[in-house]
Image (tube, grey):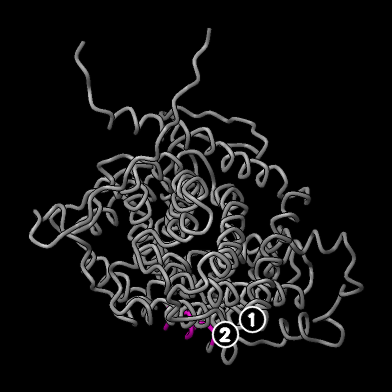
Amino acid sequence: MSHPSPAVPVPPAAPPLVAGAPAQQQGFVKALSLVDATMLVAGSMIGSGIFIVSSDIARTVGSPFWLVMAWVLTGVITLLGALAIGELAAMYPQAGGQYVFLRESMGPLMGFLFGWTLFIVIQTGTIAAVAVAFGRFLGVLWPAVSPERYAWFPQLDITTPGGLIELGLSPQRLVALVSIWVLTWINLRGVKDGRLVQTTLTLTKALALAMLVGLGLLVGSNAQALAANFGPGQFTAGVGPVTGAFTVVFGSALVGSLFSSDAWINVTFAASEVKNPKRNLPLSLVLGTGLVTLLYVTANLAYLTTLPLQGSPTGATVMERGIQYATQDRVGVAAAEVIFGPVGGTLMAVFILISTFGCNNGLILSGARVYWAMARDGLFFKRAGELNRHHVPAFALVAQSVWTSLLCLTGTYGQLLDYVIFAVLLGYALTTAGLFILRAKRPDAERPYRALGYPVLPALYLTLCTSIAVILLIAEKTRAQALSGLVLVLLGVPVYFLWRRWSAVRQAPSTVE
């Protein structure tokens, strides 16, 4: 006769951090000002994508108009998200951010699924993709840093639903690994060191990107590109009725621009370290996303004034290859070569190295705070819920770097990008749905900031995120990766219940018969 299994209680959260406790148990240090928080938003967004993915988008849409519209729509979506989720950030200015929002609105299972997916693919996959891009652009300065895998390292080509995964180690991937380890070490030394690196690098790359835009529009502008992209009928060439088939194609093309604009929410992960968070968190979200959207749209206009959109993969010059077939998709480098001449590629490569390094610093800094919050709820390794003497979650940072390092060995930039974006959109859609749930469940809760245009604008954001996620599941180009992302999310359900049971067993008092 079988007996019913006892209910598995949710493990209690770890005791609160109190003043006077040992250094390892002290709380986070509030070191991030409004400027620092805004730079964390912008710096986490601006990485390598803006200098690469326009080539793939151009090949997909085939029109200067739709290339620009892809970035405009992405900017609108991102700003709508910042305006909506800013309300949750002001309500719950706690370490963990989006994990906390989902836990409070939909319960611990949904919070865990987000944290699980963040660790398995969203945060770590993004860090790995940006790190691989760092290695790719170092190859411009140092050709020995190539994508060719070392013959002495085990090389396995595994055909998966998402394509060919090329396991192995290459010079580019080795550089990616070293960059991850260096940034993890910097952040192990405390948020003040991480903040200094983040703010300095973000200001540098924002100013450099603005300079690229200005010079591209004023100096790099040339008759050949203007005639090809903006001549009579050229800008809107191929633009016809928006059919269902084109909607699917255009939606799949947004993968690159959405990825390039992602991670704006990461500042909420480090909310406990932001000064005056109820004001500064929503404000930094809007300021950071607004700044980056402006830079991204104008950067693509600068590309179109310096390079023709159409090109040939066998073209001998940057003008012949165009935006569509820029060498290794490095459209930013191609534009710089037009503006500055042969030295332009070198200058742009240096700038992009700074950009990707700063981007990953923000991602590494913030991601570990989510795993810390999960551990405090008994839903991640217990040691991840402890702070070191520099008041940062050291174990969580190291665990994140280990898994990210493994991802660097398993996929190219494009593969990692495709796996990440579906899970990201799903997370944003659920978080926005949580905003509506909390308005109903806790109408009297303190809301220092209320979502602008509620309920219309948040509903529009929820609709756009859901629609693009569905398109990614439908489109042939992205279907396999999107399904793989969905499977990864759903795998978190049995993991959640197993983890709860394991945690309950660990905390149960031992008995001696």
The residue tagged with tag 1: helix, strand or loop? helix
The mark total stands at 2
Q: Is residue 146 or residue 482 the one in the foreground?
A: 482
Question: Which secondary structure is most common in the magenta stretch?
Answer: helix
Q: Is residue 394 left or right of residue 103?
A: left
- Decide: is 251 above or below 207: above
Residue 255 spot, x, y in % from top left: 65, 59
Residue 240 spot, x, y in % from top left: 91, 74
Residue positioned 22% across, 49% down in the render: 386
Q: Which residues are magenta?
A: 206-213
Given the image, on which type of amino acid does mark 2 rest? Answer: Gly
Where the C terminus falls, by quadrant?
top left
Determine which residue is flagged by label 2. Answer: 216
Q: Is residue 213 or residue 42 the one in the foreground?
A: 42
Residue 155 spot, x, y in % from top left: 49, 29
Given the image, on which type of amino acid does mark 1 rest? Answer: Thr
Residue 205 spot, x, y in % from top left: 41, 76
Q: Is residue 52 visible?
A: no
The residue tagged with tag 2: helix, strand or loop? helix
Q: Do the residues under discs 1 and 2 have CB atoms within 8 angstroms?
A: yes
Q: Is residue 283 visible?
A: yes
Crowd rating for badge 2 (residues with CA inside 10 Å; few <14, some 14–19, many 20+): many
Q: Tell me the CA gap for discs 1 and 2.
A: 6 Å
Residue positioned 56% across, 79% down in the render: 293
326 within the magenta span: no
Q: Is residue 400 or residue 498 the one in the foreground?
A: 498
- Decide: is 20 above or below 439: above
Q: Is residue 133 left or right of residue 276?
A: right
* First-in-chain label (1 vs 2): 2
Determine which residue is flagged by label 1. Answer: 306
Q: Is residue 9 or residue 189 the one in the foreground?
A: 9
